[in-house]
Image (cartoon, rainbow, N blue to C red):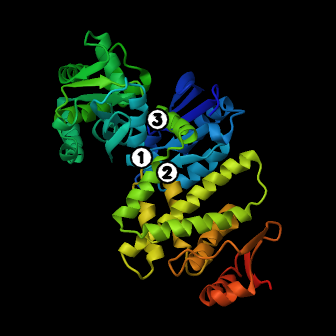
């Protein structure tokens, strides 16, 4: 990555949408601009878990303002991630489709553990480099993330459906603050978070850090009231609760440092924070400077500069967990990538970078194409797709995993089940490369595929694989399967033809 490159991270949270723009400078990211808007999509979910039209419009309006600031940015310079509210929303596709169009960049919905990992990356990169064992917590609008880590390594990640917006709506719906309401809210939060005790015991971390919204808001109030700056204690939290109860109503709270955008959700946030600190025996919580958006920025740099991608390790771990034949997976991947490269014969430098990403995705699908065998040899492609759709693989967004699952689903059988996806040229080529590779590698040994010639006609949407008579005689089973494959593509937008050449 060139020094001086501008990068932008967008965090579509349940309470606020945030845009962080930074300039890459010799391994560091210097802030150029930071925009935050209180959108409160988290309280826009109806009883059926659909976002209301008003909540979606608030989000779209914010994205339009962000888009104006990002004019001139390339796709490689921007990454937008969405968290718990859009994980929950049944109609999220309606919001995302229009949201991506307005923003001008893709929006990824990330799973809870992946959100936790990125939060830790943001926090860890902005702390001194040492080997201290850390506990990092982040209380968002509708979820709370916990991470145990050391250095830059997040070792234990989790996400719980408890947050400042959700708890304020449930236990302080009219903004009334009473001792009984705080007690009920805290007990309810502990019931959700209780399983964290075993995964995050006190002897596994030396120092606890809190990131982002609720922690920052509480720390600001406490510091301006005479408590130590940059940290939160249970004593300080108890004092704050007494102040809120004394005020009786959110609208009547007069505390220096309490911003208007936090007033409506301070009750829920404080309840969850007290529950966490009590359960995890946190006597002192230090305020971290990093957050999710910073983790996204640093990850963009690391993928580009160091060729290190958490997703590679996640794929390997899942393959081991489900006892996948890794040798076969790698073999299929090599042949599939070889075939895919013939489908994109002439590439500019920018297109070559995109091609590298295509090859990596295809290689991941190949490595995991038999992951469903651990469940059943019958319909293992369907089981594999289900696993990928529901797995928490660090580094991957939920749409990325779904797309991988579709490739695994389409590796065999009729293609009608992927009729809509095959309208997209890139997906069709990826899937064809995978299916052809599986045919050529069906004997579980390296095939003599280098002498095959593949030609792609994008205009006619036709791919032709040519073999010599000698190859056909040497590989009758592969020849039979390739002829069958030609029939499989007949009712799709793309055509596959297998021919021989003397």
Of residues 386 and 451, which is closer to you in this image?
451
| Lower sequence index among marks 1 and 2 | 1
Whether pointer 1 and pointer 2 mark residues with C-beta atoms closer than 8 Å, the reply is yes
Q: Is residue 210 left or right of residue 370?
A: left
Instruction: Count neighbours of disc 2 (C-alpha within 10 A) and say few if under 14, some if 14 to 19, many if 20 or more.
Output: many
Instruction: Count neighbours of disc 3 (C-alpha within 10 A) and say few if under 14, some if 14 to 19, many if 20 or more.
Output: many
Residue wearing tag 2: 397
Residue at 24% x, 19% y: name it. 243
Q: Is residue 144 visible to the viewer in this orientation of the structure?
A: no
- Residue 203: name its quadrant: top left
Residue 282: give x, y in percent of width and height.
20, 30
Q: Which mark is residue 295?
A: 3
Residue 121: give x, y in percent of width and height.
42, 35
Q: Is residue 196 left or right of residue 66?
A: left
Q: Is residue 106 above or below residue 416?
A: above
Spatial CA distance of label 1 from label 2 is 8 Å
Q: Which mark is residue 114?
A: 1
Q: Secondary structure at mark 2?
A: loop
Whether pointer 3 and pointer 2 mark residues with C-beta atoms closer than 8 Å, the reply is no
Q: Which mark is residue 392?
A: none
Figure quadrant of the N terminus: top right
Of residues 351 and 162, which is closer to you in this image?
351
Q: Is residue 218 above or below residue 95?
A: above
Q: Secondary structure at mark 1?
A: helix
Spatial CA distance of label 3 from label 1 is 11 Å
Instruction: Count neighbours of disc 1 (C-alpha within 10 A) and say few if under 14, some if 14 to 19, many if 20 or more.
Output: many
Of residues 300 and 500, which is closer to you in this image?
500
Figure quadrant of the C terminus: bottom right
| Lower sequence index among marks 3 and 2 | 3
Residue 65: give x, y in percent of width and height.
63, 32
| Lower sequence index among marks 3 and 1 | 1
């Amino acid at each position: 990555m060139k020094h001086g490159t501008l990068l932008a991270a967008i965090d579509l949270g349940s309470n606020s949408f945030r845009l962080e723009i930074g300039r890459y400078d010799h391994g560091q990211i210097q802030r150029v601009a930071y925009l935050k808007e209180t959108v409160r999509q988290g309280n826009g979910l109806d009883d059926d878990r659909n976002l209301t039209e008003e909540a979606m419009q608030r989000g779209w309006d914010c994205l339009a303002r962000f888009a104006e600031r990002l004019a001139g940015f390339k796709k490689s310079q921007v990454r937008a991630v969405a968290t718990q509210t859009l994980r929950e929303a049944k109609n999220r596709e309606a919001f995302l489709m229009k949201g991506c169009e307005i923003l001008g960049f893709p929006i990824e919905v990330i799973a809870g553990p992946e959100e936790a990992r990125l939060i830790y990356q943001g926090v860890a990169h902005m702390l001194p480099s040492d080997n201290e064992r850390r506990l990092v917590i982040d209380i968002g609008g509708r979820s709370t993330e916990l991470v145990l880590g050391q250095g830059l390594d997040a070792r234990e990640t989790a996400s719980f459906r408890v947050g400042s917006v959700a708890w304020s709506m449930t236990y302080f719906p009219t903004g009334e603050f009473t001792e009984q309401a705080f007690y009920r809210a805290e007990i309810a939060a502990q019931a959700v978070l209780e399983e964290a005790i075993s995964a995050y015991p006190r002897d596994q971390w030396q120092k606890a850090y809190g990131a982002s919204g609720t922690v920052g808001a509480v720390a600001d109030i406490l510091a301006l009231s005479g408590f130590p700056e940059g940290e939160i204690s249970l004593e300080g939290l108890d004092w704050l609760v007494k102040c809120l109860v004394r005020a009786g109503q959110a609208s009547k709270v007069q505390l220096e440092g309490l911003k208007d955008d936090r007033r409506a959700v301070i009750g829920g946030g404080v309840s969850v924070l007290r529950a966490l600190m009590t359960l995890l025996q946190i006597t002192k919580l230090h305020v971290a400077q990093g957050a999710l958006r910073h983790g996204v920025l640093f990850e963009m740099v690391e993928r580009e500069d160091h060729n290190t991608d958490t997703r590679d390790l996640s794929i390997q771990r899942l393959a081991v967990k489900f006892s996948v034949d890794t040798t076969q997976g790698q073999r299929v991947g090599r042949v599939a990538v070889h075939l895919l490269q013939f489908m994109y014969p002439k590439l500019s430098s920018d297109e070559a970078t995109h091609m590298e990403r295509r090859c990596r995705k295809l290689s991941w699908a190949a490595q995991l194409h038999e992951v469903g065998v651990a469940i059943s040899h019958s319909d293992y492609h369907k089981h594999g797709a289900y696993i990928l759709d529901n797995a928490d693989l660090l580094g991957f967004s939920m749409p990325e995993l779904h797309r991988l699952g579709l490739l695994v689903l389409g590796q065999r059988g009729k293609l009608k089940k992927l009729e809509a996806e095959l309208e997209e040229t890139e997906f069709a080529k990826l899937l064809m490369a995978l299916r052809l590779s599986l045919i050529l590698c069906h004997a579980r040994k390296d095939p003599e595929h280098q002498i095959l010639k593949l030609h792609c006609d994008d205009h006619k949407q036709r791919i032709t694989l040519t073999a010599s008579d000698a190859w056909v005689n040497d590989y009758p089973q592969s020849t039979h399967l390739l002829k069958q494959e030609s029939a499989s593509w007949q009712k799709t937008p793309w055509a596959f033809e297998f021919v021989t050449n003397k």
